Amino acid sequence: MVTAVTNTEPRRRNRRGEGGKLRDEIIAAALALLDEGGDERAVTLRSVARRAGIAAPSIYPHFADQPSIMLAVVQQEMDALATVLREAVDNAGPDARARLFALCNAYLDFAKLHPQRYRIMFGGLWTPSVEDTSITDADLDSLGAGAFTLLADVLGACVEEGIAHGSDDLFGDAVALWLGLHGLAHQRAVVRKMPGPADVGDRLIRALAHLK
Amino acid sequence: MVTAVTNTEPRRRNRRGEGGKLRDEIIAAALALLDEGGDERAVTLRSVARRAGIAAPSIYPHFADQPSIMLAVVQQEMDALATVLREAVDNAGPDARARLFALCNAYLDFAKLHPQRYRIMFGGLWTPSVEDTSITDADLDSLGAGAFTLLADVLGACVEEGIAHGSDDLFGDAVALWLGLHGLAHQRAVVRKMPGPADVGDRLIRALAHLK
DNA sequence: TTGTCAGACTTACGGCCGTTAGCTTATGGA
DNA sequence: TCCATAAGCTAACGGCCGTAAGTCTGACAA
């Protein structure tokens, strides 16, 4: 994670050849605004510039428009999520069931820890109808593929080891499981107080993974 | 459902004592903008007024601020959803399993038919942090209670008839089932092309209702 | 030491927003 | 017929937005 930008003193200009550093600072500023504000509408081009301590037009050498700042944020956080999930699985030992629960709980924890990020990652409204922005369809389609593949793999291992009743369609089962996780994660991220029992996450996992 | 407002001719003023009619026209205009635009940001106070064929300040006698227009839209659509679900259950006959599937599929159909409405109803970002708006917490808490109660009832009937493996916590089971439905409905409403098999909805219902 | 140019900045334009203050008009009871 | 008033309008303010055009400045090769 990149540290938040809080200093108000005039920013020190980057050295020659290091202009690209500002790109990361812009992303970090956008992320900070998102986490604090709890509203993606607060992440405007100008507010990002203010937060990063630069003038608004200074963003243009690094990003074509405001939506592409958001895309960069989402891409970065998708990678971060995939990394977190991978680490959780690796640290869970060899047991397939434990690996599945570690993966799913890490997913839910990420959403609980960063609700605003989760919202824009999986339900975000940061592209004003994709047209008239610089964002392509390919940009959007590839998002989150790594994390999902990992889920399918771990679930597949459970089926192979006989821990879970697998259907003939592993991909479909993985999608269903992810949708359940997403429903919980998203609702938690959106609502102020989530109703229901505390172990609703475990219930979803057990039911949707068809654990024996 | 209220018909969309499309005429551009100067609007006929309402008769005396019928000023309240404009309130419904405003809600209808906001709904139309939402359905078309696919972006709640397009539903501004001014754009709603334009769509309704009135001047922007003419909204204020009927709504305190822009968020409360959205709240009225959401409340209306929550009622509409509850009605649709109730009708689906009533038309499904006496079989508890058929009633449950009718309910769940009606829910998913609503979301598929009106993705933008679904989004603001269950994940909406139409209150800029609730503070400094005229919206109270009570307004938000009561939303969707009717529809959920119906789901819990129909699921409970399945358990009573021995169709489903009920746990000791019917409420929790209903929440879990709803979260699964919501995950699918929301993702369909947000993403352009939903991956996964076509029957993923049925899979979610069967698994989360613990149908035998 | 000096000149160049990457890495920023200042200024400005037009647009849409929410909201306030005060005005017009047509409806319908007297 | 008249006129009180409900219903809705016009004008305007301040604010924030995205973006274009042109300007400054300091790090570094020569």
Image (cartoon, coloured by chain):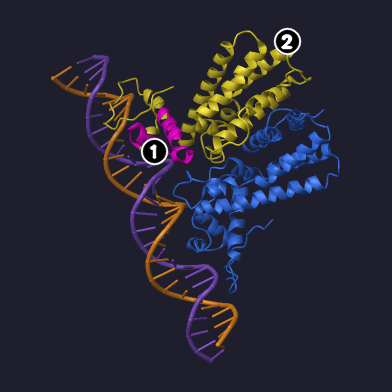
Chain colours: A yellow, B blue, C orange, D purple
Q: Which residues are magenta?
A: A27-55
Picture layout, residue B84 above or below residue D23 = below
Does residue A50 show up magenta in the picture? yes
Q: Where is residue A117 shown, x and y percent of the image? A: 51, 31
Q: Residues within 10 Å of mark 2 (few under 14, many from 20)?
A: few
Mark 1 or 2, nearer chain start:
1
Residue at x 54% of width, y 59% of height: B50
Subunit of mark 2?
A
Measured Cα–Cα span from mark 1 to mark 2 = 52 Å
Q: Where is residue C22 shown, x and y percent of the image? A: 38, 71
The image quadrant that residue B192 belongs to is top right
Q: Where is residue B70 shown, x and y percent of the image? A: 56, 51
Residue A208 visible? yes
Q: Residues within 10 Å of mark 1 (few under 14, many from 20)?
A: some
Secondary structure predominantly adopted by residues drawn in magenta: helix
**Residue at the front extreme of this rendering:** B168
User: Which image quarter holds the N terminus of chain B?
Assistant: bottom right
State the residue in front, A12 or B76: B76
State the residue in front, B115 or B206: B206
The image quadrant that residue B29 belongs to is bottom right
Amino acid on which disc 2 is placed: Glu
**Which residue is tagged 2?**
A161
Give the secondary structure at mark 1. helix
Mark number, residue A47? 1
**Residue at the top extreme of this rendering:** A94
Residue at x 63% of width, y 14% of height: A99
User: Which image quarter holds the C terminus of chain B?
Assistant: top right
